[in-house]
Amino acid sequence: MSTAPNSTLITNIAEVFTADATQSVIRDAAILVEGENIAWIGPLADAPEADIVIDAGHRAALPGWVDSHTHLVFAGDRSQEFVARMAGQDYAAGGIAVTTAATTAASDYDLTRLVMGRAAEALAGGTTYLETKTGYGLSVEEEARHARIASTVADQVTFLGAHLVPAGMDAQEYTDMVCGEMLERVAPYVQFADVFCERGAFNEAQSRQVLEACAKAGLGLRVHGNQLGPGPGTLLAVEFGAKSVDHVNYLDDADVTALAGSWKGWDAATRTGTAGTVATCLPACDLSTRQPLAPGRELIDAGVQIALASNCNPGTSYTSSMAFCVATAVLQMRLSIEEAITAATYGGALALGVQDRVGSLEVGKRADIQLLNAPSVAHLAYRPGMNLTGPVFRAGVLAAGKL
Ligand SMILES: N=CN[C@@H](CCC(=O)O)C(=O)O
Ligand SMILES: [Zn+2]
């Protein structure tokens, strides 16, 4: 087989887990990269020639993580809130205001440096596609500034002006501002909009108003829903055709039925058809807030496509470790290794609508590949807490780690 110039063959891979529709595992494998994309995957014995050969050292390979839910644009520290929570205090949305004050005080330079540092940490942990949100600005100027900074670092940016009603402001007046001037100012920098539909944040009517306005502005939708108790977030997300509803800790039968119904037009065996609303589970957040884990197992069994994401933020989940989320999903949510990895890669891509480009290792897709310092992907849960991330390739280029 002839190959294009600048082809790279990654050889001597102990096992590749592709996260494709058939959940293929190829042992003693190789991957050919041409330019940004994967050109071939198969047994090493059948590998084509290439200009450059990289020896994977008998490591396992899998897709880079797609982290579809983070809040990286922040300054300040809330470790004392975490300590108080571990001593028994409940999490409350009001903590967001503490971060808003610290972030508003940070210069563009400092804030950009902080966001870039967090994105670099995520990449070093194997995340090759990253979403992040605004939501610690809560004023027109600050939300626009955070959206602009986020857009220089993340692959996709979500507008979360509807995160908390600022102190001293009337909830309806603030919601109107989110849907009006704020939306207009952030729109050039963002692809998605989100609303924290929860007790202490935005009620059903306000959430509906935000989703309507943002859909009208042409943004994709996502919802923070059912995190702290039962509520209308999940049903609203399905009704509005949101790409994802995130947290989903407190679901009732109607919520699960609606989510499953949204996938009726999707053929999971071929990954074709009309995608529904992904249920994004955030296990690191669940642990850090001592909420019941999202029912990932039950959602999969009901026919819902799920994603796993880090929810990296200073209040409820200060980690960008997708490996930690995968290990927790296996050990505590009863997902198989393959289900958990797929949720953290392809599931995240589905939640962001980029599943045709990233999220699985398939010919023609972007060469976002992480090598593990382990001979099989099972080690991700078998050795929880260990940093197993080896070299990370993003769009065919070694982006983190050493060969
Ligand atoms: N739940 C809403 N927003 C964040 C937490 C924000 C904060 O407490 O700073 C979350 O996804 O958990
Ligand atoms: Zn969040």
Image (cartoon, helix red, strand yellow):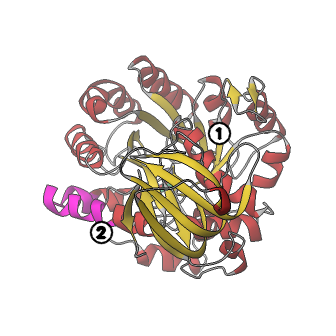
Q: Earlier in the sequence, mark 1 or mark 2?
A: 2
Q: Is 396 rendered above or below residue 77?
A: above
Q: Which residues are magenta?
A: 101-117
User: What's the residue at 57%, 30% (across, down)?
Assistant: 242
Q: Nearer the viewer, residue 403 or 330?
A: 403
Near mark 2 (Cα within 10 A), the count class, few <14, some 14-19 or many ≥20, is: some
Q: Position of residue 277 (x, y in %)?
A: 65, 33
Classify the position of the N terminus by image quarter. Answer: top right
Q: Position of residue 103 (x, y in %)?
A: 25, 59
Q: Nearer the viewer, residue 226 or 267?
A: 267
Near mark 1 (Cα within 10 A), the count class, few <14, some 14-19 or many ≥20, is: many
Q: Which residue is mark 2?
A: 76
Name which residue type carries label 2.
Answer: Gly
The image quadrant that residue 252 belongs to is top right
Main SS, magenta residues: helix
Classify the position of the C terminus by image quarter. Answer: bottom left
- Mark in front: 1 vs 2: 1
Left or right, residue 193 beside residue 238 = left
Q: Does the magenta-highlighted stretch encompass residue 114?
A: yes
Q: Nearer the viewer, residue 403 or 135?
A: 403
Name which residue type carries label 1.
Answer: Val
Q: Is 160 rendered above or below residue 377?
A: above
Tag shown at residue 278: 1
Left or right, residue 169 beside residue 26 = left
Q: Position of residue 356 (x, y in %)?
A: 55, 35
User: What's the residue at 69%, 27% (across, down)?
Assistant: 272
Q: Does the magenta-highlighted stretch encompass residue 83?
A: no
Q: Secondary structure at mark 1?
A: strand
Q: Position of residue 332 (x, y in %)?
A: 76, 68
Q: Is 304 rendered above or below residue 26?
A: above
